Image (cartoon, grey):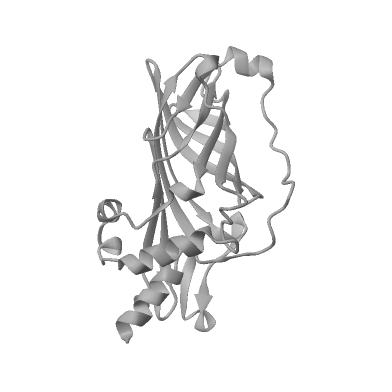
Amino acid sequence: MRHVFIVLIGALCVVSCARVSPPSAAPDEVVEPGMAWLAAATAYTVSDGDALLVVRAYRAGAMASLGHNHVISSDVVAGNIYVGSAYTDSWFDLIVPVSSLVVDDERIRAHYGEDFSAPVPEDAKAGTKINMQSERVLDATNWPLIRVRGFLADCLGAACTAHVAIDLGGTLSRHIIPLQMEQHDDRLLVRARFNILQSKLGLSPFSVMMGALSVADELRFDLDLVAVAVTPDDLVDQ
């Protein structure tokens, strides 16, 4: 019986949250650079397999031991990055298909050590993914893409600060995150490590038994990508 309970809880945990409010049909516009600036900037494109996004979600509450920590990942990140005369003169537009999100890939879990060493049953993984894609969470049917746009505000060497707009299920949220960016010949390397609250993304973290078993509001993000310099004709069509 205890095993069945743990499996059920595992299937509910992490992104088994509900929306704080219904998705907005017309989220606030994100200011984008003009066509003249885009034409003059160096353009880079990110293709499937050239990036890895990892999101870690942690169990919480007095009964946290009955749940699981989870890792959600995707290597299907695509989009365009434009760099002007300096890193601070940069703009990016990336997308991640909701369908590409993988729950608890064992190789990725192993990379994150003891907090993710406990195996997660396959039915718990499947249940978590189904719930994550459901209408009450990411609503993958109506909003199949997660879109991330933004610009760099300041840089000290390769260390930069980015202002980011995330369109998740039709709800737009704005964040300021740190990232590293380096140009190497025709390659652009980007590495970002940051935390965002689920509640800031428009989601309400899963919680039962008056919070005795819950998912921590804070999500931890790792993003690594390699973008390749291209001509305007080869840019990813968003």
Q: Quadrant of the C terminus?
A: top right
Q: Quadrant of the N terminus?
A: bottom left
- On the picture, is 181 further left or further right than 21? left
- On the picture, is 140 further left or further right than 107? right
Whether residue 15 appears in this view of the structure is no
Q: Nearer the viewer, residue 148 or 61?
A: 148
Q: Nearer the viewer, residue 36 or 62?
A: 36
Image coordinates of residue 19 in percent, x first then y, are: 62, 63
Q: Is residue 105 above or below residue 75?
A: below
Q: Nearer the viewer, residue 110 or 114?
A: 110
Image coordinates of residue 213 in percent, x first then y, are: 45, 78
Image coordinates of residue 127 in percent, x first then y, are: 42, 67
Whether residue 179 appears in this view of the structure is yes
Image coordinates of residue 224 in percent, x first then y, are: 39, 38
Counting the numbered discs, the total is 0
Q: Is residue 238 above or below residue 172?
A: above
Q: Residue furthest bottom?
A: 1
The residue under the point 50% across, 64% down is 131
- On the picture, is 143 further left or further right than 110? right
The residue under the point 54% across, 83% down is 210
Quarter assignment of residue 32: top right
Q: Nearer the viewer, residue 200 or 28?
A: 28
The residue under the point 67% across, 14% down is 36
